[in-house]
Image (cartoon, rainbow, N blue to C red):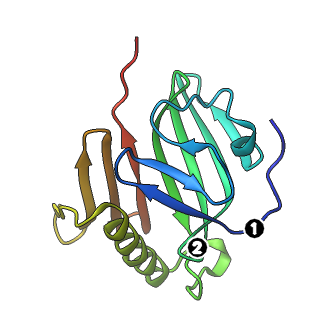
């Protein structure tokens, strides 16, 4: 594996048919069935870090990507080397990140941005709110898994990602 690429701003696109993610300029896709222990070379060049949690889970951080013109990092969660979920964090252009952490306004802007992006990519989602303090912003199920975006006001973060249905032998 090589170090993270210095190429800034590779756009991400989502495919609702299979839940895959394409990174502009790469031929490999991120999606169901991906083995993270031996990532394809073109994805490997974007890896910033890998962590083995010692319980079957490993997490790989991919940088140098953009969502709707905003810097983005992907976190690939693999269970026993099979990609099980992908989450992402976005730094919304023009939002307040004083001290490196998002302000409540930045978190709300991220949730609004991601809800718009996911609705465009995957269609209208179900919004099964869990109450005023923790509204779910976007959720949609597919045969391959689900996609979601949630504003967690208590933690002060926007969390979003894809979960894949994986079949293990």
Q: Nearer the viewer, mark 2 or mark 1?
A: 1
Q: What residue do we see at 40% from left, 11% from top?
A: 169
Q: Is residue 102 left or right of residue 32?
A: right
Instruction: Identify whether 133 is placed above or below 79.
Output: below
Name the quadrant containing residue 107. bottom left
Q: What residue do we see at 37% from left, 28% from top?
A: 166
Circle 1 SS class:
loop
Disc ID at residue 116: none
Circle 2 SS class:
loop
State the image coordinates of residue 154 (x, y, percent, origin top left). 35, 66
State the image coordinates of residue 6 (x, y, percent, origin top left). 83, 61
Q: Is residue 141 left or right of residue 104?
A: left
**Viewer-closest of 169 and 55:** 169
Instruction: Identify whether 86 is placed above or below 140.
Output: above
Q: Is residue 103 visible?
A: yes
State which quarter of the image contains the N terminus.
Answer: top right
CA–CA distance in space, label 2 to label 1: 14 Å
- First reached walking from the N terminus: tag 2 or tag 1: 1
* Contact check, label 2 and label 1, Cβ < 8 Å: no
Number of other residues with Cα within 10 Å of mark 2, as a class: few under 14, some 14 to 19, many 20 or more? many
Q: What residue do we see at 73% from left, 50% from top?
A: 46
Q: Is residue 153 visible?
A: no
Query: For the view shown, which residue lies furthest in the bottom direction?
Result: 94
State the image coordinates of residue 130 (x, y, percent, origin top left). 17, 61
Number of other residues with Cα within 10 Å of mark 1, as a class: few under 14, some 14 to 19, many 20 or more? few
What residue does disc 1 label?
Answer: 8
Q: Is residue 122 left or right of residue 54?
A: left
Disc ID at residue 91: 2
């Amino acid at each position: 594996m090589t170090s993270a690429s210095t190429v800034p701003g590779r756009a991400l696109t989502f495919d609702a048919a299979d839940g895959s993610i394409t990174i502009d300029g790469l031929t490999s896709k991120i999606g169901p069935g991906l083995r993270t222990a031996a990532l394809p070379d073109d994805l490997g060049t974007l890896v910033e870090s890998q962590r083995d949690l010692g319980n079957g889970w490993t997490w790989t951080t991919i940088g140098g990507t953009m969502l709707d013109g905003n810097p983005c990092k992907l976190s690939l969660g693999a269970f026993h080397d099979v990609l099980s979920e992908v989450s992402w964090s976005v730094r919304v252009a023009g939002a307040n990140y004083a001290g490196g952490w998002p302000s409540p306004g930045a978190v709300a802007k991220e949730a609004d941005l991601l809800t718009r992006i996911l609705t465009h990519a995957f269609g209208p989602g179900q919004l099964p709110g869990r109450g005023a303090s923790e509204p779910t912003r976007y959720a949609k199920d597919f045969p391959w898994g689900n996609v979601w975006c949630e504003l967690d006001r208590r933690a002060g973060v926007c969390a979003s990602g894809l979960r894949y249905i994986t079949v293990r032998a």
